[in-house]
Image: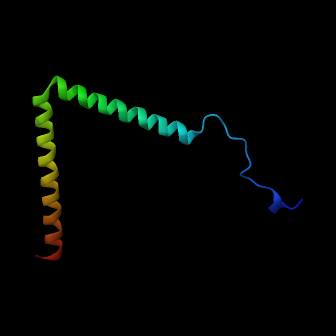
Amino acid sequence: MCPSDVHTDDRTPTTTDQGDDMQRVKKILLWVLVAFAAYAIFTSPDQAADIVKTSGSMLGDGAKNIGNFFDALLGR
């Protein structure tokens, strides 16, 4: 038998694969995050609105500052 005749991918599949476990953990964490966000919105909508407003303002300021950086870099 020649070494090229041996197939390394002929292994018996296991019942739990690490990739499947990670996907399951990610899915659970996503659902926990969604549940927490819904809970936070329903229990204190005013604070949730302030957080969204502040986050939007921060993103807008960040985009403006990046634009200013590239304008300064290009000498405009």
Question: x, y percentage for residue 50?
Answer: 10, 36
Q: Please, is residue 63 above or below residue 32 in the view?
A: below
Location of residue 63 in the rendering, given as x and y in whole percent from the top left corner: 16, 58
Q: Nearer the viewer, residue 49 or 72?
A: 49
As rendered, which of 62 and 52 lies closer to the eye? 52
Q: Quadrant of residue 6?
A: bottom right
Taking the view exactly as shown, the residue that stands out farthest to the bottom is: 75
| 15 left or right, relative to 7 | left
Q: Is residue 36 left or right of residue 12?
A: left
Horizontal and vertical percent position of residue 19: 54, 42
8 left or right of 24 in image: right
Q: Residue furthest right?
A: 1
20 versus 67 height, above or below: above
Q: Residue at x 80, y 62 (%)?
A: 4
- Between residues 58 and 10, which one lies in front from this camera angle? 10
Q: Residue at x 82, y 60 (%)?
A: 5
Which quadrant would the C terminus be assigned to in this image?
bottom left
Q: Quadrant of the N terminus?
A: bottom right
- Residue 29 percent coordinates (x, y): 39, 33
Residue at 12 percent of width and 42 percent of height:
54
The quadrant holding residue 68 is: bottom left
